[in-house]
Image (tube, rainbow, N blue to C red):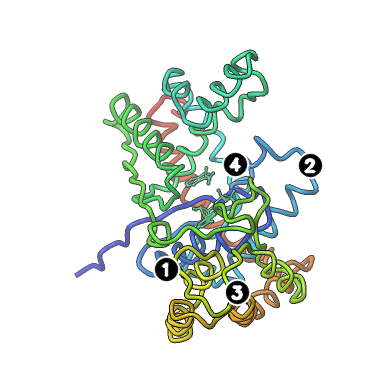
């Protein structure tokens, strides 16, 4: 009997900043867990980042840094096809073909574009002020990322679910027109397990996010990490008073981040806060120790991978080759189906 074929799971990571603790807990760890049961493809979406990042050095740095982070966090490049979007030019050709069957109205309704228009209208500006065509076409490029790799599931944060629905819509339009010759698989968004858990608070108590400039980056020097942990906000409850762990930013970070081996420590910390007698300073020391113990080996591996000419380059080259093999198979079927190839 033949082995059942594993379903394909694909996700793109936009290289627009240095990865932080929230990304590790909410995106990287859950995706690595999914890679255990799916045929997984993860990629650096550098063309998507180009809609906002204008500094070439910075884009190069973020692309490399995000790739090195995923590998340092445990991505196995043999198991997962790990590549950079711009290394797969087939994506562009399909983007044009699918643009030609996608209604402009659908793009007008996309969340990111609509939000930009609404902001402009509110400010009394031209509705399209500051909107580039990359932002407008963003969902089509993303649909192609997904469809060209014949993805079954796409693990994404909630804000990206609409884009995956668009990919399914666009696939449906194509199948309706050309389905006798080639049919795209219809993808489905899944919210990975980490997403349903806690959202990590940042240094100002709001959601940790690079847009709020309140993150704890993953690969800080030890003393900088300590300094940032000290900056996490707490109130002025005295040491002896009972405290509510579930409204305490340092505790929430500890709870979401701690590995299973530290679950005893987390439970004990919760109890001591609830009973009173543990101050915020001591809690922050516990948090720092756990973070530092976990992150130190990752930091070392990250630094190794970030060196010019490191193994990272050959891992990504190998990933690109595997990704292109898949993409070109799909593209050549599409070319035949639409009448571009004879
Ligand atoms: P940012 O908000 O810093 O711009 P992104 O939007 O690039 O982060 O998020 C990339 C991934 O990391 C998403 O899947 C998102 O859900 C996850 N993530 C980001 N911030 C957090 C957080 N504070 N807590 C949990 N997950 C997060
Ligand atoms: N748009 C996604 C984000 O902002 C990144 C992305 C690009 C992506 N292409 C994708 C995610 C394909 C999933 C599948 O996070």
Q: Position of residue 341 (x, y in %)?
A: 46, 29
Q: Are marks 2 and 1 in contact (CB under 8 Å)?
A: no
Label 2 belongs to which residue? 55
Nearest the viewer among 161 and 313 is 161
Picture layout, residue 36 above or below residue 140: below
Nearest the viewer among 143 and 266 is 266
Of badges 4 and 3, the one in the foreground is 3
In what quadrant of the picture does the C terminus appear?
Answer: top left
Label 3 belongs to which residue? 280
Badge 3 element: helix
135 relative position to 105: left or right: right
Q: Spatial distance from mark 3 to mark 1, Cα to Cα?
A: 33 Å
Q: Position of residue 93 (x, y in %)?
A: 54, 33
Q: Spatial distance from mark 2 to mark 3, Cα to Cα?
A: 40 Å
Label 1 belongs to which residue? 33
Badge 1 element: helix
Q: Spatial distance from mark 4 to mark 1, Cα to Cα?
A: 29 Å
Classify 10 Å Cα crowding around label 1: few (below 14), some (14-19), many (20 and above): some
Q: Are marks 2 and 3 in contact (CB under 8 Å)?
A: no
Classify 10 Å Cα crowding around label 2: few (below 14), some (14-19), many (20 and above): few
Q: Are marks 4 and 3 in contact (CB under 8 Å)?
A: no
Label 4 belongs to which residue? 89
- Residue at x 60%, y 51% (from the top left corner): 209
Asked if the residue at label 4 sits under 8 Å from ligand 2, the reply is: no
Q: Position of residue 187 (x, y in %)?
A: 34, 44
Picture layout, residue 20 above or below residue 271: above
| N-term mark: 3 or 1 | 1
| N-term mark: 2 or 1 | 1
């Amino acid at each position: 009997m033949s082995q059942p074929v594993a379903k394909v799971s694909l996700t793109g990571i936009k290289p627009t900043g240095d990865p932080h603790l929230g990304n590790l807990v909410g995106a990287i760890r859950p995706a690595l867990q999914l890679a255990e049961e799916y045929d997984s493809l993860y990629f650096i979406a550098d063309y998507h980042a180009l809609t906002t990042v204008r500094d070439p050095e910075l884009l190069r740095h973020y692309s490399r840094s995000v790739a090195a982070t995923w590998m340092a966090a445990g991505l196995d490049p043999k198991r997962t096809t790990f590549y950079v979007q711009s290394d797969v030019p087939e994506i562009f050709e399909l983007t044009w073909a699918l643009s030609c069957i996608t209604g402009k109205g659908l793009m007008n309704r996309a969340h990111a574009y609509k939000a930009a228009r609404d902001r402009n209208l509110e400010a009394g500006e031209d509705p399209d002020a500051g909107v580039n065509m990359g932002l407008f076409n963003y969902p089509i490029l993303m649909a192609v990322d997904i469809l060209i790799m014949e993805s079954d599931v796409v693990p994404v944060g909630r804000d990206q679910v609409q884009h995956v629905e668009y990919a399914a819509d666009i696939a449906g339009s194509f199948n309706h027109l050309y389905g006798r010759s080639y049919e795209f698989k219809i993808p489905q968004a899944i919210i990975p397990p980490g997403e349903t858990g806690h959202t990590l608070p940042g240094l100002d108590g709001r959601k940790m996010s690079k847009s709020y400039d309140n993150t704890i980056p993953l690969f800080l020097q030890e003393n900088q990490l300590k300094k940032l942990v000290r900056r996490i906000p707490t109130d002025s409850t005295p040491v002896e008073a009972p405290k509510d762990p579930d409204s305490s930013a340092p505790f929430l970070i500890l709870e979401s981040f701690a590995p299973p081996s530290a679950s005893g420590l987390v439970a004990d910390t919760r109890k001591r806060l609830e009973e009173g007698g543990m101050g915020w300073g001591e809690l922050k020391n516990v948090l720092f120790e756990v973070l530092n113990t976990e992150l130190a080996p990752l930091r070392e591996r990250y630094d190794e991978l970030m060196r010019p000419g490191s193994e990272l380059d050959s891992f990504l080259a190998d990933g690109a080759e595997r990704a292109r093999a898949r993409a070109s198979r799909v593209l050549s079927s599409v070319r035949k189906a639409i009448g571009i190839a004879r």
